[in-house]
Image (cartoon, helix red, strand yellow):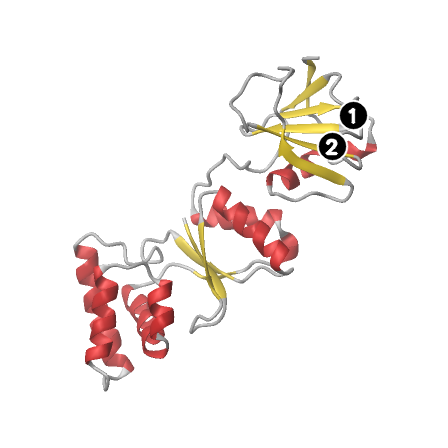
Amino acid sequence: MPVRDRIMWGASNPFSDPRLANLPGLVRDFHAGRLPHGWLGNKEWENRWLDLPLKPSGYYREFYVGTSAESGALRIVLGQEGEVFVSGNHHRDWRQVVGMPVLQTASSRPRSVDDLISTVQGEFPQAHIRITGRGRTVHRQAELMAQRRRQNRQQFLQTYRPAPHITEMDQWVTNNPRATEAQTVDAFVNIIERARRNGAAVSNHLSDTARDISIPAGGAAVQAQVRQRIEQLGGRVIDERDAVGGPHWHVDF
């Protein structure tokens, strides 16, 4: 049966089912890839009977309380643009919830890398995510790159994307084995400045579109969920557990 009515979310919960007492929180968890206790699903809702507005394949995801996809009367279906549909009788009819204060959905894009990190911190409080590195000067960027290259060439080449300035840095250190760290930093400053004049980004830290964050607490499962959410929001994660300055995640946006 198509959508029976539309409910405006307000100060009081319009649903009597206690499992929907914190519907905005449920929706935030679902969008973040988390299944609260008792909930299953996160599978595509095919909308084969066209009960919901017609959308492309894969647009809707279904969540339910039950022991299998065939059991349980309570159903929630989410659309990629933030739509929320609830059925209390296993698909016989639907109610659309509008005006609900939900955090950014998977299709939303934060305005900045700080907004991205703030969103993830709010959605995964148990991960205890902290910002450990912000924007950098050219000299500071050169220091970090010089330290990494001098201590571990393989890690240096794996961390940074192949580019002419990376090759030049690598060759400079190879050709100057007795250079001090200060001399290496000065050489890297010159390489970075020349690369930037030629249009290379070198590092998003220099353009203030990257942050270093603490590796999320909670183990591999939580880390996988946090990484997935960062990528959904338009970010890119580089796991730098062996970094010279200490283990962290580098997040580009």
Give the mark nearer the N terminus: 1 vs 2.
Answer: 1
Residue 72: give x, y in percent of width and height: 80, 30
User: Which quadrant holds the N terminus?
Assistant: top right
Closest to the observer, 11 or 49:
49
Disc 1 element? loop
Residue 75: give x, y in percent of width and height: 73, 28
Q: Which mark is residue 155?
A: none
Q: Is residue 202 left or right of residue 101?
A: left
Disc 2 element? loop
> At x 42% / y 45%, what residue is drawn?
112
- What amino acid type should be assigned to the residue bearing mark 2? Ala
Residue 70: give x, y in percent of width and height: 76, 29
- What amino acid type should be assigned to the residue bearing mark 1? Phe
Q: Which mark is residue 69?
A: 2
Quadrant position of residue 250:
bottom left
Image: 243 above or below 69: below
| Residue topped by disc 1 | 15
Residue 127: give x, y in percent of width and height: 62, 57
* Number of other residues with Cα within 10 Å of mark 2, as a class: few under 14, some 14 to 19, many 20 or more: few
Q: Is residue 11 visible?
A: no
Q: Is residue 27 left or right of residue 89?
A: left
> At x 70% / y 29%, what residue is drawn?
76
> At x 78% / y 25%, what residue is drawn?
15
Image: 127 above or below 46: below
Q: Is residue 204 visible?
A: yes
Closest to the observer, 213 or 230:
230
Q: Is residue 163 left or right of residue 60?
A: left
